[in-house]
Amino acid sequence: MKFSKAVVRCRIPILICALLLMIPSALGMAATRVNYDMLNYLPEDMDTVIGQNELLEDFHKGAFSFLILEDMPAKDAAALKKQVERVEHVDTVLWYDSLMDVSVPMELLPDRLYDAFNAGNATMMAVFFDTSTSSDLTMDAIREIRAIAGERCFVSGMSALVTDLKDLCEVEEPIYVGIAVALACGAMLLLLDSWLAPFVFLASIGMMILMNLGSNYFLGEISYITKALSAVLQLAVTMDYSIFLWNSYNEQRRTVDDKNQAMSRAIQATLASVVGSSITTVAGFIALCFMSFTMGRDLGIVMAKGVLLGVLGCVTVLPALILVFDKPLQKTRHRSLIPSMGKFAGGVVKAFPVFLVLFALLIPPALYGYNKTNGEVYYDMGQCLPQNMEYVIAEGKLRNDFNIASTHMLLVDAGLPAKDVRAMTREMEQVDGVKYVLGLESAVGSRVPEEFLPQSVTEKLKSGSWRLLLINSEYKVASDAVNTQIGALNDILKRYDQGGMLIGESACMRDMIQTTDHDFKMVNAVSILAIFVIIALVEKSFTLPFLLIAVIEAAIFVNLGLPHYLGQSLPFIAPICISTIQLGATVDYAILMTTRYKTERISGAEKRQAVHTALTTSIPSVIVSGMGLFAATFGVALYSEIDIISSMCMLMARGAVISMASVIFILPALLLLCDKLICATTVGMKQSKHPKISNQEVYVK
């Protein structure tokens, strides 16, 4: 009570403080670096990650790209190569003349070396940068190379993907927020009882979103997925808290004349409800932190922080705004557009056996589709970009003109004898899908001893500790074929050099597939266990957690099973995140209804009457909450050209509606079916009296 009175008394200082905090928040948001490279989130102890670091430290080579030049004479290509070499942070440009020196006669250069870099009217150069794949400096270099080369140059590789992804995100992200705000506002205008309240809510939530984004500065950096989704998700998830306070305040105004006293009581009542509601949501996001693929931790921390700030804003900033704008808020109130749900609830209770049968029939196909969808996800981030992006076009040229779909890099001990390197190279070139292996030995052949080559040639592919070989593959990144190929290449490598490392985008993707497969099981288990414990403590029941989680998990199965039946492939991160987010964000709907059912039963109501009352009173809140989440995410799903953002938002929007329907139709049926078991396993319900009443009395409200 002291806290709520202090908020009411200090409402003006609270608003001034919140507005002042917008300044450092905006600066912090602008200064927070955004990471667009998913491979950066792999565990640091993996060979591929260690190898990438060794390549950067020992060779001063980090990012890697292919330049494809069309209809360009050799003389012009050579001149362009020199220009590209002068671009800041370009370490090496390999072309067919790079391994040739005036001291080495041209006839000693193998024909296949020339053929490897030329195809029809196109020629190809391999470019190494001295900065990492997703470094801002690398992206600047990619843009400069594109500017130098013009329209006849196409830049492929992970750094080109990251550059295009960043440019597209920076255009789309402000529009995401605008769409989410507009549609969420529209939903609230339709579903609430005030024309002005939605704008006050958005002002309060907007301040908390900005604080959340600004405080990300202390994390060092966040992923582009986190940046794109956090504002939209925070708006959608914390909107309920504002509605709780508004409804509580208006209830108090009916019995208390003084608005300050009414708000004080409303804050006190709302704080208990909001804290209870937010715990499950926070638990869902915290579960993401258990992923070894650390992008989950990135999203989980930011969103958990956003929910907590949403709760704080709901009981501090929002009450202050409502009190300041109380007169116009009261004048613009209107009758709620949601009708009384008594008759509808009666129909649901009466037909509950039908819903039980539907639930039983729905589970097998939903579970089958869910398992199939998890096996049909894609890991190639190039698939998330629209087809007209420069990176996608370049990858198409590389694949069609040169029959190269992916490139691996080998780091082998610099002391490994040349004859062993040549033997290893010959074996690797026999592996299915390997187009060729390029290194000093394979390029100049055995006729030219390595010591005869000038340092300017050898230093490109050999350092004090390592020698570097490139393997071009006909198999696509993240495909089953390339993963099998990498396994075969690794087996050969380890026979010749136990400490050698095979690295590159495909190798990292293979590690990512293995890592995230484990993460999916881990995150699901942690989120279900955490939310089970929370529900058990809140409801003081052993049975109710099983029922509530079963209802929402069934909704998740349906949501994530639909892509299989619709012939859609999801980005790998979507099922992991959505299963946790949907459970944490929508189990509140089930808790709300169950808590009211429990209260009614304890007070002496018969089971049908208790479920009817719980359903009647809960449906409006469930609809407002579900449609708020739907509205905030559906528009973004339709607008975004980045498939990973679009897919995740569509899953969240659809999941909100499916969870909403499951709670309204399935949960009441399960409560009626399991009533005796619930009463026997729930604290306070064993001794409750349940007088018999007629069906007519149940359905007339």
Image (cartoon, helix red, strand yellow):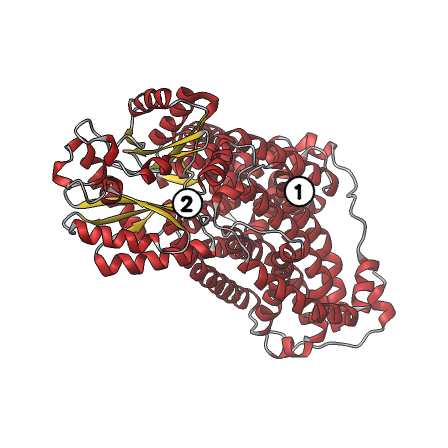
Q: Residues within 10 Å of mark 2 (few under 14, many from 20)?
A: many
Residue 84 in which image quadrant: top left
Residue at 52 percent across and 66 percent down: it is 532
Q: Position of residue 503 (x, y in %)?
A: 32, 49
The C terminus is located in which quarter?
bottom right
Image vertical order of residue 213 relative to residue 340, above or below:
above
Q: Regarding mark 2 in the picture, which secondary structure is present there?
A: strand
Q: Is residue 454 left or right of residue 303?
A: left
Residue 160 in which image quadrant: top left
Q: Is residue 518 visible?
A: yes
Dot 1 amino acid type: Ala
Residue 353 in which image quadrant: bottom right
Residue at 35 percent across and 20 percent down: it is 75
Dot 2 amino acid type: Ser
Name the residue tied to disc 1.
Answer: 631
Q: Regarding mark 1 in the picture, which secondary structure is present there?
A: helix
Q: Is residue 83 left or right of residue 390?
A: left
Name the residue tied to disc 2.
Answer: 406
Q: Position of residue 89 (x, y in %)?
A: 29, 28
Q: Position of residue 472 (x, y in %)?
A: 37, 45
First of labels 1, 2 by sequence position: 2
